[in-house]
Amino acid sequence: MASSCDSNPSSDLTRVFIWCVPRTLGTALTKCLSYIDGIQIFYEPCGAAFHFGPEGRTPHPDVAKFMDSASSNQQAIFEHAFDDSKCTYGWVRHQLEADYPGKKVLLVKDQAYGLDEKYNTIPPGFRHAFLIHGYKMQFELLEYVQKHLDPNPVVIDADDLQSNPSSILRQFCQAVGMTYSDSLMEWPADRSIMKTWKGSRILLQGNMLENEGGFYENAMKSSRFLPATATPKRSELSQDLQEAADYAMPYYVKMYQMCLKP
């Protein structure tokens, strides 16, 4: 699909997209970067449009549970949360093209699948980064970004980020125009930074359900990047997982060739 973007956002904000897939440390990285001075986080707005918005293709099975479980006190925490009922892809693009007075960086963390191949809704003027796994949809999005939006997207492997966080984060920040500091190597092990994020009320409320695990419980309790655990051997996987790994591996290999090196 060709891009319909023909103008740039009007402010001097540094604007960055981080495109993830599940289980690639995207939320932990978002939490880490939230402590950069002058940053505004947008948390999975395309994912919210995909799951919860009026154009959504797949209603999330836990929506009712999250909505029913959220107390008035929990809702009050999320002063920057948005109402999912208005979360169309066009509305998301409008929010990401807006100015944010007093902010230096607009950082959007999102799921590649959440875009649902609606490439023309990606606003111009962003640098793009990818936390990779072997997902075909993520690879196709990367190819589109290279061709139409950002010829030099930053690609990060989650294992490399865990094993060499200082090197990878320094390179990432330099590449996208953000300020790196060694203070990013450690952060508070609580959820308070979520108060500053703009994102789906349903997703943020889901993260507050500690007794039910939340979506990103480990990320919210994290305080630093820990070394990756050992990858299981292919022979240790079940047959269906072996087939999934074999399908995904060619996409992963192509993307890994572009990765930042520790």
Image (spheres, rainbow, N blue to C red):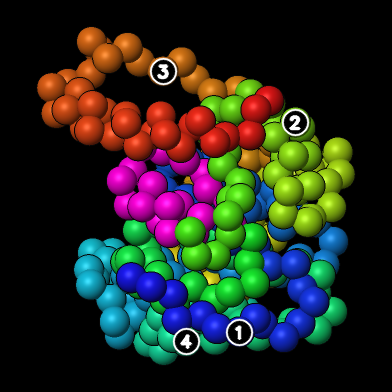
Q: Amino acid at mark 4?
A: Trp
SS at mark 1?
A: loop
Q: Amino acid at mark 1?
A: Ser
Q: Amino acid at mark 2?
A: Ser
Front-most of residues 67 and 87: 87
Q: Check if residue 143 falls in the magenta segment.
A: yes
Q: Is residue 122 above or below residue 188?
A: below
Disc sitting over residue 167 in the figure = 2
Where does label 4 land, which residue? 91
Task: Report the Cα–Cα distance between label 4 and label 1.
Answer: 17 Å
The spot of residue 93 in percent (x, y) is 51, 81
Nearer the viewer's eye, disc 3 or disc 2? 2
Where does label 1 land, which residue? 7
SS at mark 2?
A: helix
Of callouts 3 and 2, which one flags the residue occurring earlier in the amino acid sequence? 2
Of callouts 4 and 1, which one flags the residue occurring earlier in the amino acid sequence? 1
On-image quarter of the N terminus: bottom left
Q: Amino acid at mark 3?
A: Thr
Nearer the viewer's eye, disc 3 or disc 1? 1
Q: Which residues are magenta?
A: 128-146
